[in-house]
Amino acid sequence: MTAIAINPFTTDAASDSLWHHYDGQQAAQPVYLSLDLRDGEWTADYDGTVGPGATFAIHYGLVRIYSLPAIPTVEAANRLLADLAPLAQQVYDHSTITVDYRTGNEVGGVDDAGREAEERIIEALAEFGGDDADIVSEWSIDVIDSGGYGVAADSTDEQIAAIANEILSDLAANNGGAVAVCPGLVHYLTGIRDELAGGRAGGDD
């Protein structure tokens, strides 16, 4: 059989590249490893579909997905792809693509040996997340105390961005090294600056 094609993240990818939280959603999009039975691509991705739906390829088993219980950093995702590649190869070696004569759709499937490998992948991924440094941790604005970070009425946009990065670094350092993300943080800090600037302007009148 043809060897699978591992498609890792490049070294210049941001550690939180797999974290995607759409506006209006309660949580970030799930992340999974995926094996494309059509070409053997073995990669990691986030679920771009909002809600319970699935893409055509996933629905018909052409792309096999294996969910993670936490959002991994790209470094951790690359390590999982490498470590589980032999099992992904076993799945690929024991896969078939047939055509449903009723619909004309291609359908992917695996035999018993392929299913055994899939079960082992699922079991391995279920244990992921024990090391905080491997995950992306999302924080709410509600837990942010900006008072000690020097946001001022005359802070520039560049300084606001630097303060946001400092806050995220401190969150990571105080929580086992997990990569920290905080949706809306820059907007929140900018609002504080603008309120301070407005108050100062009012006091000058």
Image (cartoon, helix red, strand yellow):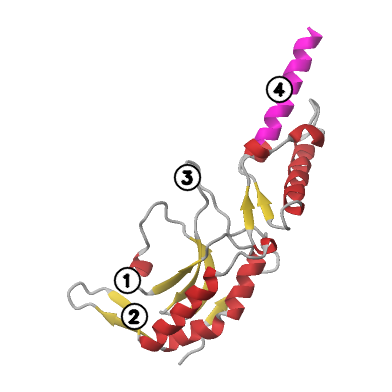
For badge 1, the amino acid type reads Tyr
User: Which three-letter amino acid code belongs to the residue tagged 3?
Assistant: Gln
Give the residue number, with chain letter if any, for mark 4. 195
In the rendered structure, which amino acid carries the disc numbered 4? Glu
N-terminal-most mark, 1 or 3: 3
Q: Nearer the viewer, residue 162 or 166?
A: 166
**Is residue 99 shown above or below 132?**
below
Provide the residue designation for mark 2.
109
The residues tagged by marks 1 and 3 sit, at their Cα atoms, a distance apart of 26 Å
* CB atoms of marks 3 and 4 within 8 Å: no
**Do the numbered discs 3 and 2 sit on residues whose CB atoms are within 8 Å?**
no
Q: Which residues fall within the magenta stretch? A: 187-205
* Position of residue 192 measured from the top left corner of the image (x, y, whole percent): 71, 28
Residue at 51% x, 48% y is 27
Marks 3/2: CA–CA distance: 32 Å
Mark before the other along the chain sequence, 1 or 4: 1
Q: CA distance from mark 4 to mark 2?
A: 59 Å
Mark 1 = which residue?
60
Residue 204 vs 65, above or below: the answer is above
**The N terminus lies in quadrant:** bottom left
Q: Which is nearer the N-term, disc 4 or disc 2?
A: 2
Circle 2: residue type: Gly
Decide if residue 54 is in sight here: yes
The crowding category of the residue bearing disc 2, from other C-alpha atoms within 10 Å (few below 14, some 14 to 19, many at least 20), is some
On the image, numbered disc 3 is attached to which residue?
A: 25
